[in-house]
Image (cartoon, grey):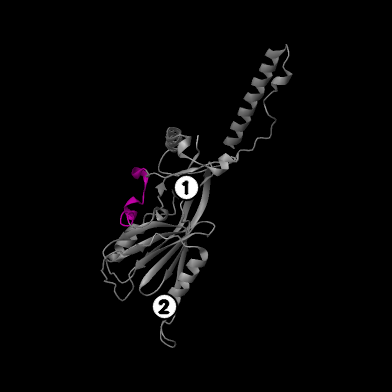
Amino acid sequence: MPPTAAVIRGVQKLVLYETRARYFLVGSNNAQTKHRVLKIDRTEPRDLVIIDDKHVYSQQEVRELLGRLDLGNRTKMGQKGSSGLSRAVSAYGIVGFVRFLEGYYIVLITKRRKMADIGGHSIYKIEDTNMIYIPNDSVRVTHPDEARYVRIFQNVDLSSNFYFSYSYDVSHSLQYNLTLLQSWSVCVESESGAAGRQDTFDIFEEEGLPTQVVHGLSHEPYSKYVWNLRLLEKVKEIVHPDWLLYIIHGFCGQSSILLHSDSARHSCMFLHRNFSKKVSIFMQNDSKSIYKSHKKVKK
């Protein structure tokens, strides 16, 4: 059966750079070997204008791009505001974009904490966020009630029991996620079997070397439990899926249990006529192990 695995989000670390006319959001994977760039217009007082070229940059390419942007946005020496591209904030994900009575804000996750590990998938809790107004001061159209709406929005404490993952769908149950992976594996296996060997050629297989193909699986989240779904509606069809981070509200916790005991198994190679006694000892040992682990959980 061909193995399947959930697709890992390619954007796990972000840096927001700013000029007077634009924001440049640079996202990278955890190893910072692959980068993506979002360009956000700051000259629109009310509308959200985002450009995603969908290109994957190397580390060298993104450095050269930022260097050109910095040089191109510098004014003449001696003038006020001669700096070109400046670093605004570092983040770990985009919560979304929101607008009240003026222009749009971008909400970024600036602090996270790992809470659990499910089958190799890390689950993070949001520790802190940053809400940044996008339009610059020269085009900003002020409204007297804007600050009140911002305070109402910030009454939702995003640092309290909001969770996300870059590779695991936290909006669905574990049973659903496992069933989806298994059903996809069966589907791929049946399709590959129907195609037959005459349609495929693998040089490693001909040489007798083992080959393994891992199919990446990505699917839509359960919208009922995605708390930032409305905040991502404006950009969902514009940006690459790697930028989209779905957040749930609830509780997630994980603790390790240490069992200082011997294994309750007995070797079948040493069974003799006193078989019933062996089975009895096995059952007693097994029950004791379960009881001890249960006591440690209570502590």
Q: x%, y% of residue 71?
A: 45, 78
Q: Secondary structure at mark 1?
A: loop
Q: x%, y% of residue 195?
A: 43, 35
Q: Is residue 161 visible?
A: no
Toward the viewer: 141 or 214?
214
Residue 50: quarter of image: bottom left
Q: x%, y% of residue 188?
A: 44, 36
Q: Is residue 72 visible?
A: yes
Amino acid type, mark 1? Ser
Mark 1 Cα shell of 10 Å, populated few (<14), some (14-19), many (≥20): some
- The reply, left or right, for residue 158 in relation to residue 277 is left
- The reply, left or right, for residue 139 in relation to residue 83 is left
Residue shown at the point (61%, 35%) measured from the top left? 296
Residue sitting at the far top: 273
Residue 48: quarter of image: bottom left
Q: Secondary structure at mark 2?
A: helix
Residue shown at the point (49%, 50%) measured from the top left? 124
Toward the viewer: 81 or 200?
200
Q: Quadrant of the C terminus?
A: top right
Residue shown at the point (52%, 67%) measured from the top left? 60
Q: x%, y% of residue 219?
A: 39, 44
User: Is 71 covered by the magenta stretch?
Assistant: no
Find residue 72 and name its label.
Answer: 2
- The reply, left or right, for residue 186 in relation to residue 230 is right
Tell me if residue 181 comes above or below residue 274 in the rendering: below
Amino acid type, mark 2? Gly
Q: Which residues are magenta?
A: 222-237
The residue that label 1 is drawn on is 167
Toward the viewer: 38 or 79?
38
Instruction: Measure the C-alpha gap from mark 2 to mark 1.
Output: 37 Å
